[in-house]
Image (cartoon, rainbow, N blue to C red):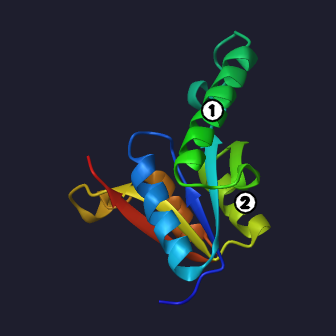
Amino acid sequence: MSQYTHVLAAVDLTEEAQQVARRAAALAQASNAKLSLVHVVEPLTFAYGGDIPVDLSEIQQQLQQQATQQLQALGDSIQVDEANRHVLTGSAVTEIHDIAEELGADLVVVGSHGRKGLALLLGSTANGVLHGARCDVLAVRVAD
């Protein structure tokens, strides 16, 4: 295995995020690499297609705040400096690719559910990260 210099753990902040973060932390420690965390909050307009005639900005702001708090707790648990914790808004795949390149990450760690069948091997986000990344990607199988 090559020595990595910057490991980026892309987490979804579900219960399984702890598994992904711990694996990324172990890899970073083994390589004496910098470790960063990223979580992407998708805009509510992505989910609803802008069809709801309601201002969702307050709810979006609350989602950002919750994600920041959860990422802070996760970062604290694996000793990631606050400066290396990133909560972004946008398309998860695009934002993960962009931050990986911006940070100079040479390994992105994502979670994947071990479902049956080749098509279900990776979730859509993990699959998208894998296929568009300019660095190594590790898909950590998380418990269902």
Residue at the limit of the structure toward the bottom, as seen here: 2
What's the mark number on residue 114?
none
Kindly indicate the quadrant of the structure image that contains residue 33. bottom right
Where residue 24 appears, as percent x and y from the top left, is: 50, 65
Amino acid identity at mark 2: Ile
Q: Position of residue 60 (x, y in %)?
A: 69, 23
Relative image position of residue 62 (x, y in whole percent): 67, 21
**What distance separates the C-alpha of mark 1 from that of mark 2?**
20 Å
Q: Residue at x 63, y 44 (%)?
A: 40
> Helix, strand or loop at disc 2?
helix
In terms of image quadrants, where is residue 111? bottom left
For label 1, the crowd category at 10 Å Cα-Cα, with few meaning under 14, some 14 to 19 and many 20 or more, is few
Q: Which mark is residue 99?
A: 2
Q: Within 10 Å of the Cα at label 2, are there few (<14), some (14-19), or many (20+) other Cα atoms?
A: some
Instruction: Answer with mark 1 or mark 2, whichever residue precedes in sequence.
Output: 1
Q: Which residue is the site of mark 1?
A: 69
Q: Amino acid at mark 1?
A: Gln
Going by the picture, which residue comes out furthest to the left?
A: 116
**Residue drawn at (54%, 73%) of the image:** 29
Residue 120 is situated, as x and y percent measured from the top left of the image, at 31, 56
Q: Residue furthest top?
A: 54
Q: Is residue 84 above or below residue 14?
A: below
